[in-house]
């Protein structure tokens, strides 16, 4: 797995280490995140990332079963805001996002990390399941 480029995405691993009581790993993850943030601030003067304009939940076993899926993989679209990039690319409530920019999405937290690392709107691709059909949505 590639190392996230966004500091906050990199910091997310610290939460896992905290839950496991791995304190040295918590410190290392937060130091690495701080270095990423500092480098981006030095290079650009600020941290700017696009906003998709949607909210997501995990795909529960019940949702998967109701859709005839054998897996809970993906992030279920709960909200798409009017006028957002999500709406512009055609994302709909109840779509299940299974990949973003070639990066597999197993749970909504994976999508959150991908969105935190996201910097360029043009060419953004989401692979979604909609009514049993796999679609690739693209922002140009």
Image (cartoon, rainbow, N blue to C red):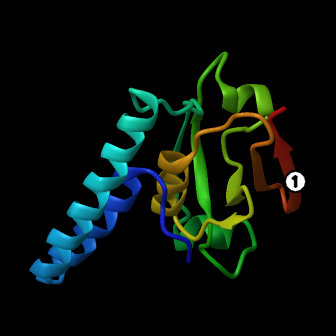
Q: Position of residue 132 (x, y in %)?
A: 85, 62
Which residue extends farthest front?
42
Q: Which x, y percent locates residue 82?
A: 64, 18
Residue 70 image point, x, y percent: 69, 82
Which residue is the extreme one toward the top?
Answer: 83
Quarter the N terminus occupies: bottom right
Q: Is residue 24 left or right of residue 88?
A: left
Q: According to the image, label 1 marks what residue?
A: 135
Q: Is residue 37 above or below residue 75?
A: above
Residue closer to the observer: 98 or 9:
9
Circle 1 SS class: strand
Of the pair 64 and 73, the residue shown nearer to us = 73
User: For mark 1, does the 10 Å Cα neighbourhood hold few (<14), some (14 to 19), or many (20 or more) residues?
Assistant: few
> At 36% across and 35% down in the image, what residue appears?
41
With 57 as the anchor, is 132 left or right in this view?
right
Identify the image quadrant of residue 22: bottom left
Residue at 52 percent across and 67 percent down: it is 60
Residue at horizontal 29 percent and vertical 63 percent from the top: 32
Q: How many marks?
A: 1
Location of residue 5 with respect to 119 vertically, above or below: below
Whole-percent x, y for residue 71 in the image: 65, 79
């Amino acid at each position: 797995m590639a190392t996230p480029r966004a500091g906050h995405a990199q910091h997310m691993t610290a939460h896992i280490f905290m839950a496991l009581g791995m304190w040295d790993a918590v410190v290392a993850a937060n130091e690495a995140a701080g270095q990423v943030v500092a480098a981006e601030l030095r290079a650009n003067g600020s941290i700017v990332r696009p906003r998709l304009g949607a909210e997501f939940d995990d795909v529960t076993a019940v949702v998967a079963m109701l859709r005839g899926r054998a897996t809970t993989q993906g992030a279920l679209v709960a909200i798409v805001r009017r006028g957002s990039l999500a709406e512009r690319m055609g994302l709909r409530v109840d779509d299940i996002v299974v990949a973003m920019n070639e990066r597999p999405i197993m749970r909504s937290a994976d999508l959150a990390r991908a969105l935190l690392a996201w910097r360029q709107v043009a060419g953004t691709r989401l692979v979604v399941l909609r009514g049993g059909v796999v679609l690739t949505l693209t922002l140009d």
